[in-house]
Image: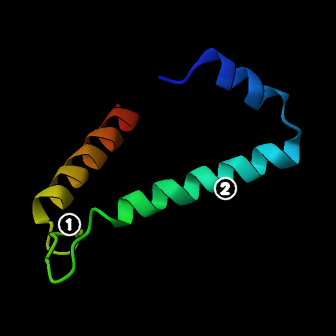
């Protein structure tokens, strides 16, 4: 939990210092995320290619919307 004192200190910073603080925090968060990926490991990635069921669902929704507009 972030303390009220810390938040008050951040609010008092000027714009440039706030941007610098954001840059530092984002950099640290990015580093933590990259630590989650291990070398020589495979990770599944979803792709829209060959997603026929999803395409059929979208087509059904489009047909239903067109039918409503023409009714």
Sequence-earlier tag: 2 or 1: 2
Snapshot colouring: rainbow
Above or below — where is 19 with respect to 32?
A: above
- Mark 2 vs mark 1: give the one in front: 2
- Within 10 Å of the Cα at label 2, are there few (<14), some (14-19), or many (20+) other Cα atoms? few
Mark 2, secondary structure of its residue: helix
Q: Is residue 54 left or right of residue 68?
A: left
For disc 1, the marked residue is 46
Residue depicted at 70% across the width and 47% down the height: 21
**Residue 3 in the image: x percent, y percent?**
58, 19
Mark seen at residue 31: none
- Residue at the bottom extreme of this rendering: 40
- Residue under label 2: 23
Q: Where in the figure is residue 71, as x and y percent of width and height?
A: 34, 30
Instruction: Estimate the x, y position of residue 37 in percent, counting from the top left.
Output: 26, 69
Q: Looking at the picture, does residue 38 appear above or below residue 53?
A: below
Residue at x-position 24% and y-position 68%: 48
Q: Residue at x 74, y 21 (%)?
A: 8
* Residue located at (23% from left, 70% from top): 47
Q: Residue furthest top?
A: 4
């Amino acid at each position: 939990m972030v303390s009220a004192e810390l938040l008050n200190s951040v609010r008092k910073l000027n714009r440039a210092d706030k941007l610098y603080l954001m840059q530092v925090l984002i950099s640290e968060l990015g580093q933590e995320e990259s630590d989650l990926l291990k070398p020589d490991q495979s990770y599944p990635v979803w792709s829209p290619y060959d997603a026929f069921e999803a395409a059929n669902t979208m087509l059904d929704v489009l047909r239903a919307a067109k039918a409503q507009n023409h009714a």
